[in-house]
Image: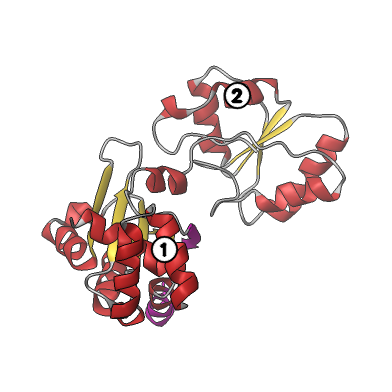
Amino acid sequence: MVATPIGNLADISLRALAALHHADRVAAEDTRVAQRLLDAYGLHKPTLRCDRHREAQAAQHVAAAVAAGQRVAFVSDAGTPGISDPGSRIAAAVHAAGLRVLPIPGASAVTAALSASGLDLQTGYCFAGFAPDKPAALRRFLQNALQQPRVTVFFEAPHRILDCVQTLCALDAQARLVLAKELSKRFETLLPGSAQDLLAWLQADAKRQQGEFVLLLQPQPAAAELDADALRLLQRLAQELPASRAAAVAADLTGVQRDLLYRWLLDHKADG
């Protein structure tokens, strides 16, 4: 399973090139896209199309080829296979045949956006794929994300990005958000702000609504869950202990979620 660049061809790894060089054939989400990548590095390999519609059938061909002793490299159109791209069925079929599946790590829009987001990832993150396209389902999806204690990362299409941010703004105009678009490409943008800020930015120029989007949402802790006594204890502990330890001790003593206390400390440290 070979990760390939999400935009800039220079992001391919030496190990990925070696895997493609030694492969007997290349299975690909789109053979035309794969061929451009192979041509860029002077590689000549037979290809097998394995898009979502053909993946189940192609997975059996791949498993049979590996069982026959061939080396098969699978690539999606961009990034890491199986992450909102085909690939999982192929890996499952090869595993089921008792054969080895090797991950060749590399570019991923998810981790690229997270690494530069500046969001608090101490409580982890949840990758949710593409946001739903139906208005009611989108609203439920965003409501659920706002209630999570961790960052929610999801993809959005250019023709839906405005509706998505408008829906989020209606739910919580001050929700912390990072909009990442065209990662590793010429018009790469990473823009943190509130839902209201980013809606205004998108509406200011229709061209800003073009491209491939990754959205990272980090809801704020509910103030009602942090009572005055818990905050006083937390602040006193933070004078003596690191923030993570202070939050853990305060959580034990008050019953308030440790993640909420920790995020409150980080937010107020940033605010001075």
Seen from the viewer's position, the closer of residues 131 and 259 is: 259
Q: Does the magenta stretch include residue 229?
A: no
Tally of marks: 2
Region in magenta: 124-141
Residue 256 visible to an observer of this rendering: no
Residue drawn at point x = 30 percent, y = 65 percent: 235
Residue at horizontal 48%, vertical 57%?
124
Task: Report which quarter residue 168 is drawn in.
Answer: bottom left
Q: Residue furthest left?
A: 204
Q: Position of residue 251 (x, y in %)?
A: 46, 70
Judging depth in this view, the residue of 177 and 81 nearest the camera is 177
Q: Mark 1 points at which residue?
A: 247
Reading the image, the residue beneath label 2 is 15
Looking at the rendered structure, which numbered label has been put on residue 13? none
Q: Can you say whether 251 is above or below 272 in the image? A: below
Q: Is 151 or 108 nearer to us in this picture?
A: 151
Where residue 256 appears, as percent x and y from the top left, is: 43, 76
Q: Which of 228 and 194 is in front in this view?
A: 228
Q: Which residue is drawn at 31% across and 82% down?
A: 224
Local SS, label 2: helix
Q: Is residue 165 above or below residue 189?
A: below
Measured Cα–Cα span from mark 1 to mark 2: 42 Å
Q: Which of the two labelled residues, at mark 1 and mark 2, occupies the earlier sequence position?
A: 2
Whether residue 112 is visible to the viewer of this picture, yes or no, is yes
